[in-house]
Image: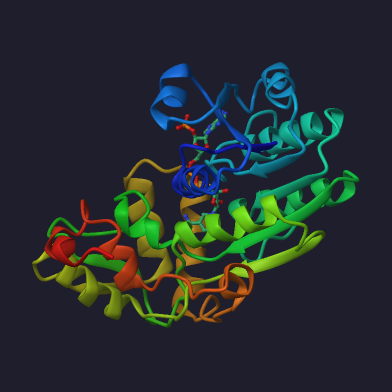
Amino acid sequence: MILVTGATGSTGGHLVSQLKARGSAFKALVRDRGKGDALGAPYAVGDFADPASLAAAMAGVDRVFLASPGAQGYLVDGEQPMIRWERNVIDAAKAAGVRHVVKLSVWNARIGGPMSEGGHGAVEAYLKESGLEWTMLQPGGYMQNFLRPETSLGDEDGNLIGPEGDARVAFVDCFDIAAVAAELLTGDTGRNNSYVITGPEAVTYTEIAAKLSEGRGRPVGFRGEPARVIADRLRGYGLDSQLADDLAGQYASLGAGVYEEVTDVVERFTGRKPRDFDAFMAANPQAYPALASSAR
Ligand SMILES: NC(=O)c1ccc[n+]([C@@H]2O[C@H](COP(=O)([O-])OP(=O)(O)OC[C@H]3O[C@@H](n4cnc5c(N)ncnc54)[C@H](OP(=O)(O)O)[C@@H]3O)[C@@H](O)[C@H]2O)c1
């Protein structure tokens, strides 16, 4: 039996649908009954911050998909909540005799890195030392970021704002991260390994703006901004100052081409190419209504 955490999230939501379609034995961890009922799948109610609820959710479970919201920009008792939360899940899994944890991490996860990469780096190290079998999924940028205003910067006219440099970025659709996770959780491959997961090609922000124009049915321009301007912009949206600086640094890395490598991980595990940006947009007609008629 698989436990899917983060089951209402961008990746976990696809994983729930895909495990359902496969007829796999699984349950979702959700924070309340309303969310569980909406999933239309077996679920356990629990919270990452509540170890007793996690222990109860682990009943009968032998594999876990671990996904939390990641860095949130504040510390509790000097530590990022995500680190404690994910450790709680790993501890509960170990105590329940779980064999394998598939962790949703991030490309360049490392101890001591900025908030996101540093938080994931700390959890990766904890999981590796736990004695459980593990697999780290390390995506770069999500295509889903272009669905949510808080993860895709824009100006008041709906134009896209991104890093200076406009290098290529190998954005991935969470649908494909979930597909790799489904293979790992239902088979016996990929144990004790880390995988950088990307889409099928690397695209520039300028190219994405052109695609968004097509999808939204109106012109979308692109403007590259220096990291310090992006950091101020993020602070203006109410983000914690440290997280704003870290994210702006990540934008700068995107603009410098740090995330342009394309890997074949999705195809290796699923036997098919990952979705490109056009397919991602067609699969999200609510956000890209001008393409609704050609949804794949
Ligand atoms: N965005 C990117 O480009 C990117 C790139 C690489 C890696 N990542 C990593 O991807 C991860 C996020 O994945 P995602 O986007 O698929 O997830 P997401 O959409 O951010 O969803 C987060 C999930 O965690 C659940 N959750 C939040 N707080 C919880 C709590 N206290 N107890 C139990 N569940 C809780 C949420 O449930 P509710 O519905 O109850 O809120 C939701 O299901 C982060 O670790 C991030 O660092 C992101």
Q: Nearer the viewer, residue 14 or 170?
A: 14
Q: How is the image coloured?
A: rainbow
In percent of width and height, residue 197 lies at 58, 68
Kindly indicate the quadrant of the structure image that contains residue 105.
bottom right
Left or right: where 116 falls relative to 210: right
In percent of width and height, residue 294 lies at 19, 67
Outermost residue, left direction? 218
Q: 236 above or below 173?
A: above
Left or right: where 215 falls relative to 172: left
Q: Residue at x 49, y 76 (%)?
A: 273
Q: Quadrant of the N terminus?
A: top right
Q: 162 above or below 182?
A: below
Q: How many marks?
A: 0
Kindly indicate the quadrant of the structure image that contains residue 287.
bottom left
Kindly indicate the quadrant of the structure image that contains residue 189.
bottom right
Q: Nearer the viewer, residue 151 or 236?
A: 151
Q: Nearer the viewer, residue 114 or 90?
A: 90
The answer to whether any part of residue 225 appears in the image is no
The answer to whether any part of residue 261 appears in the image is yes
Left or right: where 134 falls relative to 219: right
In percent of width and height, residue 85 lies at 67, 33
Q: Residue at x 57, y 45 (%)?
A: 70
Q: Residue at x 12, y 63 (%)?
A: 290
Q: Residue at x 30, y 72 (%)?
A: 278
Q: Quadrant of the C terminus?
A: bottom left
Outermost residue, front direction? 23
In percent of width and height, residue 58 lies at 73, 27
Q: 105 above or below 267?
A: above
